[in-house]
Amino acid sequence: MQEAQRIRELPPYLFARIEKKIEEAREKGIDIISLGIGDPDLPTSEHIIDKLVEQAHNPENHRYPTSVGMLSFREAVAKWYKNLYDVELDPKKEVVSLIGSKEGIGHISFCYVDPGDINLVPDPGYPVYGIGTLLAGGKPYTMPLTKENGFLPDLKAIPGDIAKKAKLMFLNYPNNPTGAVADLNFFQEVVEFAKSYDLIVCHDAAYSEITFDGYRAPSFLQTPGAKEVGIEFNSVSKPYNMTGWRIGWACGRPDVIEALGRIKSNLDSGAFQAVQYAAIAALTGPQDCLDEVRKIYEERRDIIVEGLNSLGWNLEKPKATFYIWAPVPKGYTSAEFAELVLDKAGVIITPGNGYGEYGEGFFRIALTISKERMQEAIQRMKEALGKVEF
Ligand SMILES: *Cc1c(COP(=O)(O)O)cnc(C)c1O
């Protein structure tokens, strides 16, 4: 039987060719260093694991959770926002738990998008914004993120008729894959734009805590008026090394939070309560682990940026995220360069076009392996490529 149009229309899987090559190399016993996957290699803290174990033994947690999350979890999120960003949230109306923020990012389009509707989606960007839009029957409208604009969308370049029709605008700062950050002035422009066109802003703050050199990223919800136009997605995944635990949240504008909760109550019935207790332990427990994590990624960032610069690149050190976004040398497409680096150096980098057409000409490196392996990767690239030109 033929599959439904909505899944047949999903974009082709761009990394398939590289993945096949990795498999071939591994079969031949070649040592591959992967700078491809944005998934923390560090373990979750012991006190968080202990909380999960303790709560897993409690039969009260073996039953269905509520779909919007335990009130104590939502209170922990509200307190975390108050402490870190001085943002006030009503845990009963302005926070909903998610099975990882990806789940909510994927589902939010089902709340607002009818077939043919438009969502504004950054390119390059996390693929789920566009995919969620397509699955709901909508059309993603690309907001190009270019180096010239500091990888911020140019809101003035969005045609008025598109903006009028648009339902959601997805944003993500600190940004995956570019490592760019946004300030409150930009967020203020976004709030004005959203108000004038009556659209909902969905800010993805997955990397809010992964910041360097003393820089602190603002929350979108710190912007005056933000809670009237939008929500913010976040999770314990990246800051607390908990990607496998699948627990996150959306917070902000109450009717949007309620709509997301309604979709969830009809689809997934929420997250395992023992996992919610573990997330509470992460959010309310000792926070020195955040400084440790920042220090580790900062050191790794310096190794990659300084290493690539010694090969001929001219990169600035990003202020946040665990990604380095770099241009490919002259004469290559993103896919060709990624293939060359894999073939000649046994190093995996992610071709930028995997994040959208405006990612063409770039590649992404994830800082989620040890310093030693990174140094080895740079050394191998040096031997394989020599000096590169742009
Ligand atoms: C990792 C990531 C997420 C999703 O993380 P969850 O584990 O689902 O909370 C969301 N957005 C971006 C940009 C990411 O890189």
Image (cartoon, helix red, strand yellow):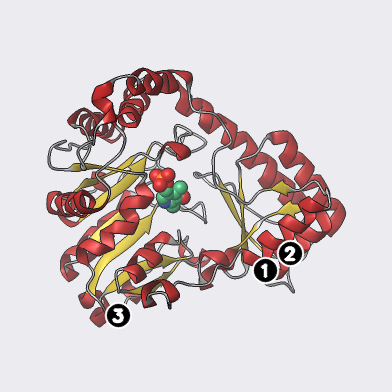
Q: What is the three-letter code of the residue carrying label 1?
A: Ala
Whether residue 61 can be seen here: yes
Nearer-N-terminus badge (3/1): 3
Q: Nearer the viewer, residue 192 or 120?
A: 120
| 3D distance between C-alphas at marks 3 and 1 | 31 Å
Q: Residue at x 69, y 35 (%)?
A: 371
- Identify the residue under disc 1: 335
Front-lying residue, 41 or 317? 41
Q: Is residue 149 shown above or below 178?
A: below
Whether residues under marks 2 and 3 lie with C-beta atoms below 8 angstroms apart, the answer is no
Residue 71 percent coordinates (x, y): 18, 31
Residue beneath disc 3 = 159
Quarter of the figure that contains the N terminus: bottom left
Q: CA distance from mark 2 to mark 3?
A: 37 Å
The residue wearing badge 2 is 339
Q: Write down the quadrant of residue 240 in the picture.
A: top left
Q: Nearer the viewer, residue 97 or 193?
A: 97
